[in-house]
């Protein structure tokens, strides 16, 4: 498949919509600026399309709590907590200590 280079005509719909044009080759399916979807997207730039966000969902509440903690300067823990007594963590500490011992020689 070859890349299609789109060059807009002067006084085209692209000019009317105030769209940015780049000379880079377009990869994938070409965009029709006259389509209803493109015209709808151009009327509200920056507006998210797709599934709306439910502010009462459990995830949104958790994200709001996390943002509040960040704004208050509290420490925010992310991800799975580390078990310092696991075999892997003990082996990692031993390897790190061995590496430090070798570097200090």
Image (cartoon, rainbow, N blue to C red):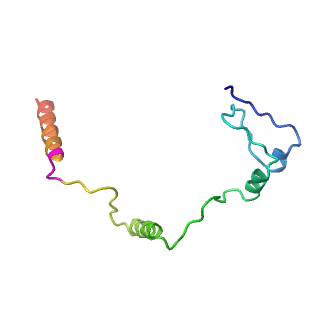
Asked if 99 appears above or below 88 in the picture, the reply is: above
Please indicate whether residue 73 sits to the left or right of residue 89 in the image. right
Which image quarter: residue 76?
bottom left
Residue 100 is situated, as x and y percent measured from the top left of the image, at 15, 36
Asked if 16 appears above or below 70 in the picture, the reply is: above
Residue 43 is situated, as x and y percent measured from the top left of the image, at 77, 58
**Residue at left 34%, top 58%?**
78
Prevalent SS, magenta region: loop
Please indicate whether residue 17 sits to the left or right of residue 54 in the image. right
Looking at the rendered image, the quarter that the N terminus falls into is top right
Which image quarter: residue 9?
top right
Asked if residue 87 lies in the magenta stretch, the reply is yes
Asked if 88 appears above or below 37 in the picture, the reply is: above
Asked if residue 5 lies in the magenta stretch, the reply is no
Q: How many marks?
A: 0
Outermost residue on the bottom side: it is: 56
Residue 84 is situated, as x and y percent measured from the top left of the image, at 17, 53
Taking depth in this image into account, of 48 and 11 the one nearest to the observer is 48
Which image quarter: residue 6?
top right
Taking depth in this image into account, of 91 and 97 the one nearest to the observer is 91
Please indicate whether residue 28 sits to the left or right of residue 33 in the image. left
Residue 63 is situated, as x and y percent measured from the top left of the image, at 44, 66
Outermost residue on the right side: it is: 11
Looking at the rendered image, the quarter that the C terminus falls into is top left
**Residue at left 73%, top 38%?**
30
**Residue at left 54%, top 69%?**
54
Please provide the residue range marked out in magenta.
Answer: 84-88
């Amino acid at each position: 498949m070859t890349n299609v280079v789109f060059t807009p005509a002067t006084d085209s719909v692209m000019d009317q919509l105030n769209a940015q044009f780049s000379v880079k080759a377009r990869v994938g399916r070409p965009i029709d600026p006259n389509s209803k979807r493109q015209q709808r997207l151009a009327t509200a730039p920056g507006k998210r399309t797709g599934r709306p966000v439910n502010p009462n969902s459990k995830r949104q509440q958790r994200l709001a709590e996390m943002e509040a903690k960040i704004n208050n300067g509290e420490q925010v823990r992310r991800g799975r907590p580390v078990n310092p007594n696991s075999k892997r963590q003990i082996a990692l500490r031993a390897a790190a200590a061995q590496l430090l011992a070798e570097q200090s020689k």
